[in-house]
Structure formats: C-alpha cells, structure tokens
Amino acid sequence: MSTLPETVARWDKFLAGIHERFGAVLSEAQTGCAQLLANNDYDTSAFGIAWSAMEARAKQLDSKLWNSWEDKVSPMFDALDLEAAVEDRERHKAETLSGRMEVELEQMRVRVFADAARAVWQRAVAQAPPQLSCSGCGAPMAAPQALSAVNLTCPHCSAVVTYEPGMRLRAIEHFCVHPLCEELSWQQWLAQHEAERALNDSRNETIGLLQAYEHAQVQYWRTYLTHRVQLLPARAADFDKDLRGRMAAWYDRVHHSAAWIKAGRPRTLA
C-alpha cells in the first residue's frame, strides 16, 4: 500500500497533468478558431461550432478530474485511514483546479470571440464601398457609417436613397459587439463570478452575500452596456431599460428569498 506522501505526490502529478492538457486544448482552440475564420474568408457561420467542439474537449478534462477523484483517488485516501481533514485538503485541490479551469475557459472564450470580432470588423470596414450613387440623379453620395439599412436624402435632387450596408457590415452588430463588450468588461465579470461563488458556497444565504452579488452583477452589466453604447451609439436611449432587463431574471429569482424579504427587498435598480 502506498504511503500518504506517495499518494499525495501521485495526486499532485495527476492534477498538474490535467491542467497542462487543459492549457494545450485552450491554446489549440485559440489558434484553430482564428485559422478557421481566415480560411473561410471571415464567414462566421462555422466559428461557433468549432469553438463548441473545443469547449467540449476542455470540459471533458474537468469531468475526468472528478471521475478520477471519486473512482480512484478518494478510495486511496480512505484506505490509508486518515483524519477527514487530510482528505478534505486533497479534495480542495481538485475544487481549486476545477474553479481555475472554469475561469480560464471563460477567459479564452471571450478572447477567441473578441479576436474574431476585431478581424471581422476590420475586414468589413475595409471592403465597404466608400460611396453610393443616387437612384434619382446618379450623383455620388458618401456612404454612412451604419450597420443597418438607413434612408438618405440626396443633396443634389432630394431623392430618398436607401443605403444597405451588406451582410459583412450587418454582421458587425450581430457577431462583433457582444464579445468586444465582454472583453472590455472582463474584470467586472470576474468580480461577479467571485460574488456568485461566495453566495453558492455559503451555508446560509445572507443579505450581505445577496447584495454583494447584486452589486457585482449591476456593475458588470453597467460596464458592458456602457461599452456597447460606445460601439452602437443608437442604443444610448435604451441604456436604463436594457440594464433593468439584464437584471430582471435575477430579481425574479431572489424575490422569494427569506433573507431578501426580511431586509425589505432592497433592490439597487427600481
């Protein structure tokens, strides 16, 4: 039978191997998705499918981590007849690595999609025609910086001309804006994630933990939407409505929490 130091050493080596393989999958995903986008002339239709396949491979390593703990490692520690604190300490290593990989996977997803968004945006702008012709008099007109169809008035004959940006420019709003806003709000996402984990790990759902999570969510969405307005100025008028909308589902869930009710349901957003 292995001794405790030998068992711990084998477990540590296994954890290090899982994390190394996990990092290799993420690196392959970053390179592979960028290459796929370029090879497909920046058509994004296959991009999400490719990322999902890579993401599934990464998550399989997390499953392997916990399957190994349950099927092999935990029984090995049980056989050594140790104090519960020893096994708890070793299980905590798995929990720490699993949490770390969860954040690293999310960070890579944001990075991969933001990198793709920049490439698609640059390509679309570079290929956009600088001008169009009036359908009434044929005079040249400057093409607007628009991501959707807009009506323009010809300065020469006053005819109304509809500008259609084309699929590449339309894809900017559909594909590009969200990941760029996610990237610019990464630190706020981390704070939100930590607040959520603290709430989930607590045995008692306290008003302090609920409010900390609420505050972190509001800060994340406020930052995200601020960056979105910078990219899509037309959305500025809907900022407050969109912010409340992002928080609506959570407020519905917490509405019946005993701690929330006892505190008088102190919402940050009315």
Image: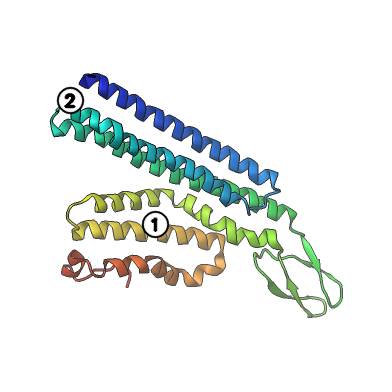
Label 2 SS: loop
Residue 248's image quarter? bottom left
Assess disc 2: are there few (<14), some (14-19) or many (≥20) residues with their C-alpha within 10 Å of its C-alpha. Answer: few
Residue picked out by circle 1:
220
In the rendered view of the protein, which quadrant contains the C terminus? bottom left
Q: Residues within 10 Å of mark 1 (few under 14, many from 20)?
A: many
The kind of residue tagged 2 is Leu
Q: Nearer the viewer, residue 74 or 226?
A: 74
Q: CA distance from mark 1 to mark 2?
A: 46 Å
Residue that mark 2 sits on: 80
Q: Is residue 148 left or right of residue 114?
A: right
Q: Where residue 2 sits in the image (x, y, percent)?
A: 24, 19
Where residue 83 sits in the image (x, y, percent)?
A: 13, 30
Nearest to the observer: residue 174 or residue 124: 174
Q: Residue at x 69, y 55 (%)?
A: 125
Percent coordinates x, y for residue 10 in the rendering: 31, 23
Query: In the image, what residue occupies the spot 74% across and 54% down?
Result: 127
Q: Quadrant of residue 15?
A: top left
Looking at the image, residue 220 lies above or below residue 16: below
Label 1 secondary element: helix
What is the basis of the colouring in this image?
rainbow
